[in-house]
Amino acid sequence: AEMREARIKKTKTVCTYCGVGCSFDIWTKGRKVLKVEPQMEAPANQISTCVKGKFGWDFVNSSDRLLQPMIRKGDTFVPVTWDEALSYTATRLSEIKEKHGPDAIGYISSSKCTNEENYLMQKFARAVMGTNNIDNCSRYCQAPATEGLRKTMGLGGDTGGIEDLAKAELVIIVGANPAESHPVLSTRIRRAHKKYGQKLIVADIRKNDMAKRADLLLHPNPGSDLVWLSAVTKYIIDQGWHAREFLDTRVEGFDEYAKSLEQYTLAYAEEVTGIPQADLIRAAEMIRDAKSTCICWAMGVTQHMGGSDTSTAICNLLLVTGNAGRPGTGAYPLRGHNNVQGAGDFGCSPPYLPGYERVDDETVRSKWEQAWGVALPTTPGLDNHRMVEAIHEGELKAMYLFGEDMALVDSNANHVQSAFEKLEFFVVQDVFFSKTCEFADVILPASPSLEKEGTFTNTERRIQRLNRALEPLCESRPDWEIICDLANRLGANWNYQHPGEILEEACSHTELMKGVTWERLEGYNSLQWPVYEDGTDTPVLYLEEFALPGGKARLVPVGWTHPFEMAEEFDLHLNNGRMLEHFHEGNLTYRVPGIKEKVPTAYVEISPELARERGIVTGALVRLVSPYGKVRLRAAVTDRVQGKELYLPMNTPKDQEAVNYLTSSYHDAITHTPAYKEISVRMEVLEPR
Ligand code: SF4
């Protein structure tokens, strides 16, 4: 009856999936999602969406939504009231803090949740519980890119917007697959390439959809990007093609940097990367001939032991060629989740308060101490990688995590899960019973984006509002409400009535977002940070000066970290990443019947050569084994991969197929981002078919 009476309602929302940040009207009737209707005024996507944004919403009514709080009793979970769950959680957290100190508890926030929820989680960790042990999943993906950008240009965000990618004369894509991971953004590049003569260079070890269209395709050996990037930069300087005036007036450190490139000759680069010298020269010439160049990169670059240094090398190349601080140029680390940018911007990071203001800077800290009315912890806390190690070492006793299936998405899943087993107390807040929930002591049911209000920040630093299309299902609640209730039970006196109040509190104290208000984000309005007090925002960064002391960018010498080598028996390199139809660990998209029907499961891509050698065809059942674990799944034979290269999407419906049972704990030295892409396996054929 309720369904019959319900009226059709149109609500503007922002996509819950990738970092492109498509916004659209969503039509609902009762709890039924009728359709998604994109609008011309949507700033990132206009009338485009991809399959996930258009059809990926039925998970909101999935029969396995978490509907009420639960507490572990032995091996089972018993439903309890919110009051019981929150009181129990508050008591246990207080006891552990009392006994072991505030730093014995770690907090993980979510790049799928809103800016306001992320802000509250870090405020909860710092101001209520007294620790800087707060992190989010950008540690798993883009922290190295942020590091490279901050060192060379000053701010940890894409330097321009999707519009600039469409305007550039040359786009270079390194270790990214926007056709599947950022579909609407890739459409803009494809259109510019096809219709407006934009040139495209793709450097990737897999022949993905963008690689097939490239004017120049570079196929480097795994983990060797820094070498070819540096060799191209050196060649440009040697030929005198560098942007002398730009370097003289806007950049520091040229001489030292040029000198540091000495070893990166074309011959050396060919030897290490396998890319023919002629192709490296061609790349340099294409950069020389283009008036504007953008470089996009993602996890093919960042998820290596030298991920931060390679990101820095990309920024160096842009600076040497004068491709920064102008429309149509710049650096574009493509953010994965819809709000991975915002989770970092709003302070969910061990050394940073909101706006990337450091916790160990006394002036910054006293500003936030005044704002929040409490003394704050002074030293950076543990990141999520260090938290896992600290649990194993017995230092970290408890965790509160929301919207993150860390048991499967962190690398070396067996190592992470055995850490979770050691926790004295573990609170997991999510929409579904994830793998991580299996290790919880308390499970708190949260609402997905359609059931809440707030803001997300996309890969262009663009802050956009989402509105509530559906009421929270049963007893599930928006994350910000749960965090508030828990904080108040632990002695905070938070009285937020609406996410708009949280946003304005956060932004009023944050230099980077001073002028962001709820009203300024009405409807399809959006703001790209930095946003000044008068509401002026910044579509393109660094037009006048870079955000480093003195206003100049800085060239930073970097060295190449050789990918770690494995025993000979692990003879196949295992690349991994996304696929178009599914998202991340698959908790949402495998619960959308329309999408699941189309792509029901994950599979491992195998080259035709290797398939012939091992006597298998598409559909064969194989087991992949690494020193850290094993998975069993079907094979798909395709020329997207070559030789001894395998590709396994990280999106799988069965947890035992997850790629992270194979990956290691090796990581980028600077950011601790796992080297997900540096793994080799051996393959056992179980059923050749
Ligand atoms: Fe959503 Fe990304 Fe697809 Fe846009 S491109 S609809 S943001 S998944």
Image (cartoon, grey):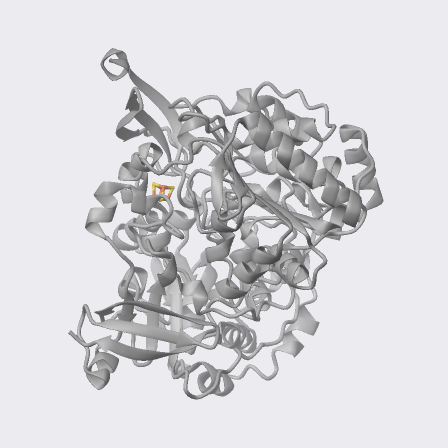
Q: Quadrant of the N terminus?
A: top left
Q: Is residue 595 above or below residue 411?
A: above
Q: Which one is in front, 10 or 105?
A: 105
Q: Position of residue 155 (x, y in %)?
A: 63, 49
Q: Is residue 502 above or below residue 546?
A: above
User: What residue lies at 40% left-to-right and 58% top-to-bottom?
Assistant: 171
Furthest residue to the top? 5
Residue 314 seen by the camera:
yes
User: What residue lies at 62% left-to-right and 28% top-to-bottom?
Assistant: 484
Residue 282 seen by the camera:
no
Q: Which one is in front, 532 or 465?
A: 465
Q: Quadrant of ligand 1?
A: top left
Q: Position of residue 410 (x, y in %)?
A: 51, 59
Query: Does 306 sit left or right of 211 as displayed?
Result: right
The answer to which image quadrant residue 211 occupies is bottom left
Furthest residue to the front? 74
Query: Does 307 sit left or right of 573 as displayed?
Result: right
User: What residue lies at 32% left-to-right and 39% top-to-bottom?
Assistant: 53
Q: Quadrant of the C terminus?
A: bottom left
Query: Does 579 sit left or right of 421 as displayed?
Result: left
Q: Which one is in front, 395 or 534?
A: 395
Q: Is residue 211 above or below residue 165?
A: below
Q: Position of residue 284 (x, y in %)?
A: 45, 72
Q: Position of residue 568 (x, y in %)?
A: 44, 88
State the count of labels.
0
User: What residue lies at 71% left-to-right and 52% top-to-bottom?
Assistant: 548
